Image (spheres, rainbow, N blue to C red):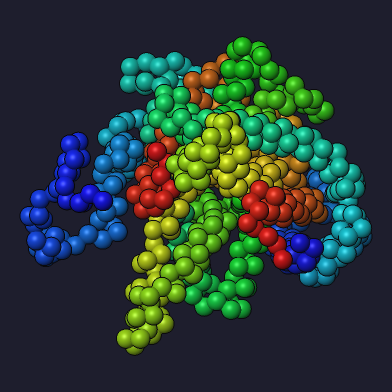
């Protein structure tokens, strides 16, 4: 039996020096540092994401075009002379002219406002209605939940486009963009409601909620002060992602000739009009399509970035 | 399993009833008098009009109309169109075309979506991963009708590889381009879904264990990673099969395919309530049955899920 403490050659052991930092300093928290919340963490992740930066720049630009189309073109999109029908591009009219002799560039610029307002308004309504109904279903439970969930199932089973066409057919004479907004919201709220219900259900039984009940909060206060703010992240994610899809739906409905009236300048309507001259003048169809695709792309990329920031479990990149 | 199946089928009934009632109510509320429209420019003969109304149950209150429709639908009697054709004939002529189109699109998106998604998920960060990711993002952003026109212009007109339109009795070759267009958006979603699933599974403990046991790379990928990654993909595919039939409307419009979507769109424009409601009923049934099949498939894919 050799003594443990005798070191044989080659057995020299490294002994770490005694801890130089006392435990207390390791454990102290810097009180002066600002508190980090989930939202500030998310914002920090977002700022570093190139996807977010690209899409944010694009979206700011698109919003600027929608607000001030006059900055980009002095041509009236509704001033069309048949003399110019299908004329190629010339100075001042970079994209040429369509069949009616309207300036394609001006129509692309002015179409931005239509697409963007339909997308944003539909999303706002969908988020408000969907969150409210989903939260009520998840929070109340019982028969209220059962009834609301069945209603959601029913709306889910109707293909959105089919339902939208049936409803829009009734309002052919209405020329306001609100009809498209409301129809998209009518068939769009269900997915948000489903997600809101799930989020509320999962945060309903967490400790902070029990604690606040123990402190005497009413159920309503609990719902609005504690449960809803904690359920917001998935709702924001689906709202950003679906904004792009509402823009596509609006264009699709206008393309079918059943969405916005032909007097409204819209990308979908212009694409539909250019359909018949696809074989001879594809460029007339090309420009509004690119504008539409870039806008949708910007919002989808933004949705991806927001999702990565708010839901770290589902990183896409 | 049998009990679960029965409960699920019972749960389907209120959904199907609710959906048909909703659509029936929407269609019923369509403005305009279809009976007057049938007379065209000629003056309306009141007694004939009344007879037609009675024949189509248009004179009865809304709920009675709906219940009569349901009663007849059970015997597959969906009534006649305004031009006198039985609705079921029109549907059975159009349905096979749409089924063919939807199945082709389904195979296209399932095969290419999974293959590209899995490759991209396994080799994250490689240049072809980035290419696949960018292409799928582009496919999602470009609306179906634009993809359709691009396909028509390049594949059809410019390079004349595929036929531009399909016509009334399309074969496999005619439907190839429409099917790719119809499936393209869903394919992009499947690529993204499969990619994120695979890449999150690759680094999990059970994969490391399998590799440590000396399993070949092939078995690790096919028997462990893929089997665990496919559950969300199968869910998406199952729901999409129903959605494809409804979404075929745009594609059928662009490529002039006389399927269900084409028929429905024309019927909505003409105010043919019977036809619209019948088609939507069928589509809802397909959708709900697909969802049920997906839930059944879960048990096969994930042995942890057992239905009592």
Q: Is residue B52 left or right of residue A209?
A: right
Outermost residue, front side: A1
Q: Is residue B141 left or right of residue A15?
A: right
Q: Quadrant of residue A30?
A: bottom left
Q: Quadrant of residue B216?
A: top right
Residue B190 x, y percent position in the rendering: 56, 39
Whether residue B50 is visible: no
Location of residue A130 with respect to B144 vertically, above or below: below
Residue under the image location 34 percent in, 80 percent down: A211
Whether residue B102 is visible: yes
Residue B70 x, y percent position in the rendering: 84, 63
Quadrant the C terminus of chain A occupies: top left
Q: Nearer the viewer, residue A293 or B232?
A: B232
Q: Is residue A218 left or right of residue B104?
A: left
Location of residue A56 with respect to A277 vertically, above or below: below
Q: Quadrant of residue A222?
A: bottom left
Q: Nearer the viewer, residue A249 or A142?
A: A142
Residue A156 x, y percent position in the rendering: 62, 57
Residue under the image location 21 percent in, 51 percent down: A4
Outermost residue, bottom side: A216
Q: Nearer the viewer, residue B251 or A107?
A: B251
Residue under the image location 54 percent in, 62 percent down: A194
Residue B188 x, y percent position in the rendering: 54, 35
Label tally = 0
């Amino acid at each position: 039996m050799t003594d443990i403490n005798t070191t044989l050659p080659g057995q020299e052991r490294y002994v770490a020096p005694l801890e130089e930092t006392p435990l207390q300093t390791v454990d102290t928290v810097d009180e002066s540092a600002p508190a980090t919340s989930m939202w500030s963490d998310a914002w920090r992740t977002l700022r570093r994401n190139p996807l977010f930066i690209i899409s944010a720049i694009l979206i700011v630009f698109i919003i600027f075009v929608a607000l001030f189309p006059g900055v980009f073109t002095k041509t009236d999109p509704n001033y069309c002379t048949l003399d110019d029908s299908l004329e190629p591009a010339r100075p001042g009219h970079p994209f040429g002219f369509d069949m009616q002799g309207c300036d394609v560039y001006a129509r692309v610029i002015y179409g931005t406002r239509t697409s963007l307002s339909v997308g944003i308004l539909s999303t706002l309504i969908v988020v408000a209605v969907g969150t409210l109904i989903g939260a009520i279903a998840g929070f109340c439970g019982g028969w209220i939940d059962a009834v609301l969930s069945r209603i959601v199932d029913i709306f889910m089973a109707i293909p959105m486009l089919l339902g939208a066409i049936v409803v829009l057919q009734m309002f052919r004479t209405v020329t306001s963009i609100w009809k498209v907004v409301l129809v998209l919201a009518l068939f769009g709220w269900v997915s948000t409601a489903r997600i809101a219900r799930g989020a509320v259900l999962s945060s309903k039984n967490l400790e902070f909620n029990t604690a606040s009940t123990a402190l005497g909060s009413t159920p309503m206060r609990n719902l609005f002060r504690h449960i809803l703010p904690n359920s917001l992240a998935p709702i924001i994610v689906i709202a950003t992602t679906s904004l792009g899809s509402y823009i596509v739906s609006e264009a699709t409905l206008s393309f079918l000739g059943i969405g916005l009236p032909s007097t409204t300048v819209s990308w979908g309507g212009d694409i539909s009009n250019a359909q018949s001259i696809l074989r001879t003048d594809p460029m007339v169809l090309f420009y509004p399509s690119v504008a539409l695709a870039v806008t949708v792309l910007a919002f989808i990329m933004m949705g991806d970035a927001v999702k990565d920031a708010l839901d770290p479990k589902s990183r896409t990149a | 399993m049998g009990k679960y199946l029965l409960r699920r089928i019972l749960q389907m009934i209120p959904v199907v009833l609710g959906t048909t009632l909703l659509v029936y109510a929407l269609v019923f509320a369509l403005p305009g008098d279809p009976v007057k429209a049938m007379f065209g420019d000629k003056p309306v003969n009141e007694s004939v009009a009344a007879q037609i109304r009675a024949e189509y149950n248009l004179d009865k209150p809304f709920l009675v109309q709906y219940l009569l429709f349901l009663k007849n639908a059970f015997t597959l009697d969906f009534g006649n169109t305004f031009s006198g054709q039985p609705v079921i004939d029109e549907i059975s002529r159009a349905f096979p075309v749409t089924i063919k189109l939807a199945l082709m699109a389904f195979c296209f998106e399932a095969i290419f979506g999974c293959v590209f998604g899995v490759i991209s998920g396994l080799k994250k960060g490689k240049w072809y991963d980035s290419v696949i990711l960018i292409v799928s993002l582009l496919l999602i952003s470009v609306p179906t009708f634009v993809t359709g026109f691009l396909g028509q212009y390049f594949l059809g007109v410019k390079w004349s590889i595929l036929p531009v339109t399909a016509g009334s009795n399309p074969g496999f070759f005619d439907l190839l381009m429409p099917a790719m267009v119809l499936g393209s958006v869903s394919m992009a979603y499947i690529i993204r879904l499969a990619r994120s699933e695979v890449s999150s599974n690759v680094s999990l403990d059970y994969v490391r264990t399998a590799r440590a046991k000396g399993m070949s790379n092939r078995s690790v990928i096919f028997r462990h990673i893929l089997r665990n990654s496919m559950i969300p993909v199968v869910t998406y595919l199952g729901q999409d099969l129903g959605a494809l039939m409804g979404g075929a409307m745009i594609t059928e419009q662009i490529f002039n395919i006389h399927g269900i979507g084409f028929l429905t769109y024309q019927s909505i424009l003409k105010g043919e309530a019977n036809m619209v409601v019948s088609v939507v009923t069928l589509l809802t049934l397909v959708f709900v049955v697909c969802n049920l099949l997906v839930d059944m498939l879960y048990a096969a894919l994930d042995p942890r899920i057992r239905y009592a």
